[in-house]
Each structure stands twice: as C-alpha cells, then as structure tokens.
Amino acid sequence: MDSDTFWLALALVLVIEGVFPFLSPAGWRRMFVQIIKLNDGQLRFFGLCSLIAGGLLIWLLL
C-alpha cells in the first residue's frame, strides 16, 4: 500500500462523514445529542462493532 492509497482512503472518510451534516444538519444534531446520552459501555460496544465491520470489509476486499 502506498501513501496515495492512504490519503485517498482518508479523503473518502472525510467525504462520507460530511454528507449527513451537509444534507440534514438538524437530523445530524439530533443524532449527535442522542449519542451524547449513551453511557461509556454502549459507546464502546458501537465502537467495537464498527471496528469489526471495517476489519471484515477490508479483509473481504483485499
């Protein structure tokens, strides 16, 4: 993997992260308030699920 691939992946993450707040700022804000209300265990669970799903996708694509 070269550095261009890394920067392309980072740029793609930024684009994906920016779509929802751009299209629906009020909905994004409501979702963010709900996320803040979660306790640490719930946040860690969702973080672990994201890590596993991302790892599986990378494994399947490579």
Image (cartoon, grey):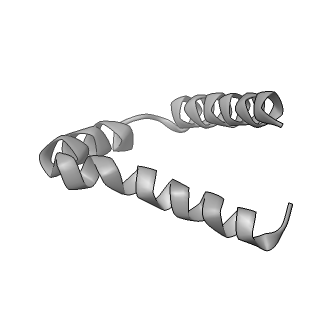
Q: Nearer the viewer, residue 10 or 46?
A: 10
How many numbered marks, from 0 up? 0
Which quarter shows the N terminus?
bottom right
On screen, residue 25 versus residue 13, left or right, reads left
On screen, residue 29 versus residue 32, left or right, reads left
Where does residue 6 sit, x and y in percent of width and height?
72, 64
On screen, residue 4 versus residue 36, left or right, reads right
Relative height, residue 28 to residue 39 (above, below): below
Q: On the image, which quarter does residue 22 sit in?
A: bottom left
Please give the name of the residue rendered at 30% of the width and 36% of the height, measured from the top-left corner: 34
Please give the name of the residue rendered at 61% of the width and 37% of the height, measured from the top-left corner: 47
Where does residue 51 sit, x and y in percent of width and height?
69, 37
Please give the name of the residue rendered at 29% of the width and 46% of the height, measured from the top-left corner: 20
Relative height, residue 28 to residue 58 (above, below): below
Where does residue 26 sit, x and y in percent of width and height?
13, 47
Which quarter shows the C terminus?
top right
Where does residue 38 sit, x and y in percent of width and height?
41, 34
Q: On the image, which quarter does residue 36 sit in?
A: top left
